[in-house]
Image: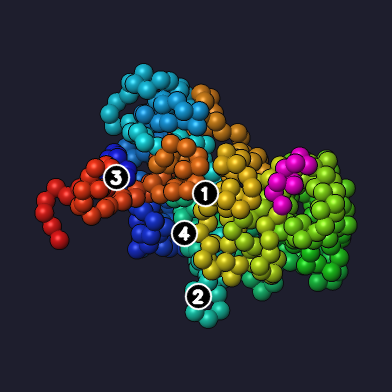
Amino acid sequence: MSDSPPQQPFRLPRSGHGEGGAHGPGHGPSQGPSHGPDAGESPGAGPGAGLGPGRPYRPEPGHPATAEATTLLLTGARLTDGRTVDVRLGGGRIQVVGTAGSLPAPALSRVDLSGYLLLPAPAEPHAHGDTALTADAEGPVSYAPDEVQRRATEAALLQLGHGATAVRAHVRIGDVHGLGPMEAVLAARRSLRGLTDLTTVAVPRLLTGLAGADGLAMLRDAVKMGASVIGGCPDLDPDPTGFLEAVLELAAEHGCPVDLHTDGDDPARLARLAAMAGGLRPGVTVGPCGGLSRLPLDAATRAADQLAAAGVRVTCLPQGDCAALERRGLRTAPVRLLRASGVRVAAGSGALRDAGNPVGRGDPLEAAYLLASQGGLRAGEAYDSISSAAREAMGLPEVRVEAGFPAELLAVRGDRIAGVLSLAYSRIVIHRGRVVARTSAVREYCDSAVAVALDLPRQGRTKPGP
């Protein structure tokens, strides 16, 4: 039998990159840069605009992506508490969760989730859309706006196919590229509306001294353009404290969250950050903090306690560091120690096939798998780090498989979270109440008495063939 049961036909923008399933990023034409914040964009840049080989992708009338109010019934889904339920979605939210077979709906709006575990969808709190997919570039990496937009779009769609219905992309600004990469990622955000939620973090290199004056001006411009989070790498500035002061002042002025890169190997610097960030709303996140793992236990514990007292969140990168810190081979943050001190810890994927990790997958479930297999977390705790904790770090509303909550869901073939993290092959991704991505894996075994006797999952042939 197939590893994934038959489903209703489903179409997404396709390209030559069929790796991993039926979802695939397109390589459509570049959209011109915009200088206005995303909140004021024209609704004409609808779902999938700018995707597809050579022409924009437009959903056909009646396609699930055309009406958020479309009702969808998920049948036979298993929940983490062991129940098998039907779930009705409408208006972008979960309307009803009932016992299996209790919620009738028209056949065309039904998705059979028999054999699937239904979970709150992951979110990706630490991506780098401007540098993603550059590891195999021949020669210098191009930062032309159309190339950056293409990479950011493809990366977001790959992560969507893995299950992340929201992505926070850290985008470098300044140097020779100026605001071009930010303009391009904001254009990608508009093109992806209705498929995934992409937000941007402006990441300047320097903010202090003569060299930092331009960086500070450019950071202000990035916020005016539509960057919704202020970031950066204080470790790389000659005056880390001055860098923090500039970032926190600008964030307070504009009411923006802060998301900073730091190795976390300097306890005094972390203590200053905690003291300065305490009480800032809507909040401060730091990561990947792999250097905390190299500190003596008492120093790491004090730092964790200070971060917890200040309400500073940590986003760790279990798959390895990103290129933004310009260092490699660092250990993952001590997640258990941080959690024990009361720090809210999210997990991100970081590098997606760029200089930081040429084989990075951008898969939230892999991050959770690594936390469970190597970080000492239980499977449920590990999944929480890529779902509830990640959404919280990104300022997104909570998701539960209960009536009234946002319909941001991931169905994965399996019946327990541990099994899902081990073999997360077939996935169905739901964003705003619509199926937006599907990956179907089929496992086959040769014809043998053992395979037949054990009823191992396989796909039988209807006709003889080679």
The vertical placement of 93 against 265, above or below, is above
Circle nearer the N terminus (4, 1): 4
Circle 2 residue: 137
Circle 1 residue: 365
- Percent coordinates x, y for residue 420 in the rendering: 47, 43
Q: Please give the range of residues in magenta.
A: 334-342
Three-letter code for the amino acid on which mark 2 is drawn: Ala
Circle nearer the N terminus (1, 3): 1
Three-letter code for the amino acid on which mark 4 is drawn: Glu
Circle nearer the N terminus (2, 1): 2
Q: Can you tell which of label 2 and label 3 is closer to the viewer?
A: 3
Three-letter code for the amino acid on which mark 3 is drawn: Leu
* Residue depicted at x 23% and y 55%: 446
The numbered dot on residue 456 is: 3
Q: How far apart, in angstroms, are the residues tagged by discs 4 and 1? A: 19 Å
Asked if one can make out residue 274 in the rendered structure from this viewpoint, the answer is no
Circle nearer the N terminus (2, 3): 2
Q: How far apart, in angstroms, are the residues tagged by discs 2 and 1? A: 27 Å
The numbered dot on residue 154 is: 4
